[in-house]
Amino acid sequence: MAGENAQARIGKSIVICGEVRGSEDLVLDGRVEGTVTLAEGRLTVGPSAHISADLSAKDVLIMGRVQGNVVATGRVELRSGCNVEGDISAIRLAVEDNAVFRGKVDLTQAVAKGPEVAKVPVGDAVSS
């Protein structure tokens, strides 16, 4: 019945305390406390969700309430009506009108490129 591209779903009446890990797309409509880590998946926090957890995924879409830090290797979207308390680290961030966000934002292109750029001038300065 469910296709390969179907998203896993945690329903409104589900409460999870602990760690959620996976590599597929996930929709959270319930309550989660702890951490949520999706290696290559898209995490969607539904409008009825109450999340007290650090979130990590490729892309994160937030429509509900999140208390915790959000880390994405791709894009974070804060939709109208959401409430986020925590820091966001991603490559791209989209914020709709009427989204509530309290925290810091770190938009970085590639962490690996930073040290390489820093080493080049040091090597040139030492040459005789």
Image (spheres, grey):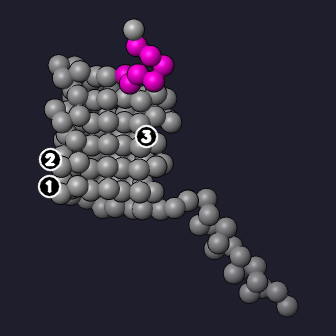
**In the orientation shown, which residue stands out farthest toward the right?**
128
Boundaries of the magenta span:
2-8
Q: What residue type is labelled 1?
A: Asn
Under tag 1, what secondary structure?
loop
Return the x and y of residue 103 as percentages of the image width and height.
25, 59
Q: Which residue is pictured at 23% across the width and 48% down the height?
A: 79
Asked whether 3 falls inside the magenta stretch, the response is yes
Residue carrying label 1? 98
How far apart in space, not on screen, are marks 2 and 1 (Cα)? 6 Å
As drawn, the residue found furthest toward the bottom would be 128
Residues at marks 1 and 3, CA–CA distance in whole angstroms: 24 Å
- Residue drawn at point x = 46 percent, y = 34 percent: 41
For discs 1 and 3, the disc positioned in front in the rendered view: 1
Label 1, residues with CA under 10 Å away: few <14, some 14-19, many ≥20: few
- Side of 34 where 67 appears, left or right: left
Q: What element carries label 2?
A: loop
State which quarter of the image contains the C terminus: bottom right
> Quadrant where the N terminus lies?
top left
Task: Name the foreground residue: 6 vs 58.
Answer: 6
Tell me residue 15's x, y (percent): 22, 22
Say if mark 1 contacts mark 3, CB within 8 Å. Answer: no
Residue at mark 3: 57
Residue 33 x %, y %: 26, 32
Decide: is 82 above or below 22. Answer: below
Whether label 2 touches label 1, CB < 8 Å: yes
Please give the residue where the numbered disc 2 appears in the rendered image: 81
Mark with earlier residue (1, 3): 3
Q: What's under tag 3, amino acid-wise?
A: Ala
Residue 104, quarter of picture: bottom left
